[in-house]
Image (cartoon, coloured by chain):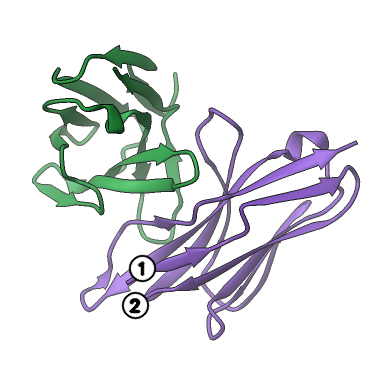
C-alpha cells in the first residue's frame, strides 16, 4: 500500500455540488498539507495541519475547508464547486522542517 | 513576501549535463528542496540544501548560495527518463521560526532528446 493515499483518483462534478477529497497516511507524520496544481502556476498551498487540533490557511484557502479527523487522515472539501477549481490536487505529509514531503498520487478534479 | 523563479522550459541531449537554476526572495529562509515530477504524477524528493555548497547524489547534485538567494540542480549523464518537471521549493521562516510549509516555484519542464 502507498504511504499516502488519496481518494478518489479522478472526479468529475457539477458546479454547485459539495465534494470531499480524502487523504490518509501510514507514515506516522504529524504534518499534513493540501496543494493544488494548475498548468503554469505550480503547486499552491490550500491548507495545512501540524496535528489534529491545528489547522492553518494557506495562500489560496477561499472556497475550501478541511478536517483533520485523526493523525492519519486529512480531508479537503469544496462546499460549492466552481469550474475554476478544476485542478490536480495533492495531499502531502512531512516529518519536520528538514525533511521533504511525501506526496499522494493526486486527485484530478474537473468541475463542469 | 516570497518569490521563486526558475526557467519554464529547457531542452538537453541524452548523455549531456544540464543545470536548472532557481532564484528566490523570501522574508526568511530555512532551506531549499528540489523535486522531480513526471507528467500526471506526484512530485518526488530529490535533494535538500540548508547550508551553502554542493550536495551530490549520484547523477544529481544541488548547490545553494544563501547570500545570493540562488540554487541550481545539476543533472549529469542525462537519460530519456529524466524528461520531467523539476520543482524548486523554499522552506520559509517567520519571527516564530519555520513556517512549516514549502513554497514552490512554477517548475522547469526538461525535455531530453536522443
Q: Tell me the residue at 54%/28% (across/down).
A: B40
Q: Position of residue A35 (x, y in %)?
A: 34, 41
The tint chain B carries is: purple
- Which residue sits at x=29%, y=27%? A24
From the viewer's perspective, is A17 left or right of A94? left
Q: Nearer the viewer, residue B49 or B18?
A: B18
Q: Nearer the viewer, residue B8 or B72?
A: B8
- The answer to whether residue A9 is above or below residue B46 is above
Which quadrant of the structure image shows residue A111?
top left
Q: Are marks 1 and 2 on the same chain?
A: yes
Residue A12: image location, x then y, percent: 32, 13
Dot 1: element:
strand
Which numbered tag is attached to residue B27?
Answer: 2
Looking at this view, name the residue that lies furthest to the left: A53
Can the viewer see residue B57?
A: no
Q: Which chain is green?
A: A
Question: Residue B107: which disc?
Answer: none
Q: Which circle's residue, 1 or 2, is located before the other in the chain?
A: 2
Q: Is residue A44 left or right of residue B5?
A: left
Q: Nearer the viewer, residue B57 or B33?
A: B33
Res B37 visible? yes
Say above or below: A99 vs B4. above
Q: Is residue A69 left or right of residue B33?
A: left
Q: Secondary structure at mark 2?
A: loop
The residue shown at (55%, 50%) is: B107
How far from the left and from the top, in percent, is residue B26?
39, 74
Quadrant of image for the N terminus of chain B = bottom left
Specify the quadrant of the image occupied by residue B81.
top right
In the rendered image, which quarter contains the C terminus of chain B? top right
* Residue nearer the viewer, B89 or B4: B4
Which residue does the numbered mark 1 point to in the structure image? Answer: B92
Contact? badges 1 and 2 (CB < 8 Å): yes
Amino acid at each position: 500500500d502507498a504511504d499516502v493515499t488519496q481518494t478518489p483518483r479522478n472526479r468529475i462534478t457539477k458546479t454547485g455540488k459539495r465534494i470531499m477529497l480524502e487523504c490518509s497516511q501510514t507514515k506516522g507524520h504529524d504534518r499534513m498539507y493540501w496543494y493544488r496544481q494548475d498548468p503554469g502556476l505550480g503547486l499552491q498551498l490550500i491548507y495545512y495541519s501540524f496535528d489534529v487540533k491545528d489547522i492553518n490557511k494557506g495562500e489560496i484557502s477561499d472556497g475550501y475547508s478541511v478536517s483533520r479527523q485523526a493523525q492519519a487522515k486529512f480531508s479537503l472539501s469544496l462546499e460549492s464547486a466552481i469550474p475554476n477549481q478544476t485542478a490536480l490536487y495533492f495531499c502531502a505529509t512531512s516529518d519536520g522542517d528538514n525533511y521533504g514531503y511525501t506526496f499522494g498520487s493526486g486527485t484530478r478534479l474537473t468541475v463542469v | 513576501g516570497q518569490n521563486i523563479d526558475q526557467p519554464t522550459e529547457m531542452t538537453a541531449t541524452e548523455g549531456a549535463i544540464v543545470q536548472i537554476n532557481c532564484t528566490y526572495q523570501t522574508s526568511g529562509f530555512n532551506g531549499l528542496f528540489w523535486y522531480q515530477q513526471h507528467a500526471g504524477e506526484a512530485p518526488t524528493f530529490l535533494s535538500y540544501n540548508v547550508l551553502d555548497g554542493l550536495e551530490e547524489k549520484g547523477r544529481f547534485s544541488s548547490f545553494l548560495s544563501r547570500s545570493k538567494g540562488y540554487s541550481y540542480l545539476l543533472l549529469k549523464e542525462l537519460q530519456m527518463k529524466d524528461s520531467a518537471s523539476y520543482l524548486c521549493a523554499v522552506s520559509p521562516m517567520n519571527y516564530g521560526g519555520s513556517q512549516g510549509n514549502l513554497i514552490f516555484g512554477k517548475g522547469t519542464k526538461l525535455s531530453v532528446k536522443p
